[in-house]
């Protein structure tokens, strides 16, 4: 089975094309209510550690390569990453939802690449 993993901002409307929707941030998306934000799975532990997230937010573009490296290292020993891989193993289409304003430099990008490569 070919699997498609997309990424999308949490603030964009849900679509039937999204497939299985996974929220991948540690913090709830600002301004969205629990009644209106649709997701199928959320485990806060899949997100970067608080320390890594705070370090990255100081200067995201300048530190992107180092953030990727550190987050990938965290994922290797993170049981939530194994849980994520199990949760999507039988899904043909998955959408990773993130709340960052930066569509290029965010944890969903790294997570998608890691999930696809494993």
Image (spheres, rainbow, N blue to C red):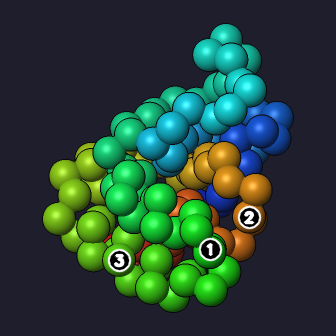
* Residue 26, x across and y down, in percent: 45, 42
Categorize mark 2 by other alpha carbons within 10 Å: few (<14), some (14-19), many (20+).
few
Dot label at residue 102 = 2
Left or right? Give the position of 21 relative to 45.
right
Left or right? Give the position of 56 relative to 47.
right
Q: Residue at x 27, y 75 (%)?
A: 73
* Residue 76, x across and y down, in percent: 23, 70
Q: Which quadrant would residue 60 be assigned to in this image?
A: bottom right
Q: Residue at x 39, y 83 (%)?
A: 69
Q: Quadrant where the C terminus lies?
A: bottom left
Query: Extreme front residue here?
Result: 58
* Residue 5, x across and y down, in percent: 58, 61
Query: Where is mark 3, residue-wise?
Result: 70
Dot label at residue 60 = 1
Query: Extreme right residue here?
Result: 13
Q: Residue at x 62, y 86 (%)?
A: 62
């Amino acid at each position: 089975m070919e699997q498609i993993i997309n990424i999308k901002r949490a603030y964009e409307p849900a679509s039937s094309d999204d497939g299985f929707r996974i929220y991948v941030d540690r913090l709830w998306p600002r301004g969205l209510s629990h009644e209106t934000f649709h997701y199928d799975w959320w485990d806060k532990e899949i997100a970067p550690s608080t320390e890594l997230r705070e370090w990255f937010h100081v200067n995201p573009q300048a530190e992107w390569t180092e953030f990727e490296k550190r987050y990938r290292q965290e994922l290797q020993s993170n049981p939530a990453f194994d849980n994520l891989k199990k949760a999507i193993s039988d899904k043909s289409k998955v959408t990773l939802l993130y709340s960052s304003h930066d569509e290029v430099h965010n944890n969903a990008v790294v997570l998608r690449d890691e999930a696809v490569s494993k």
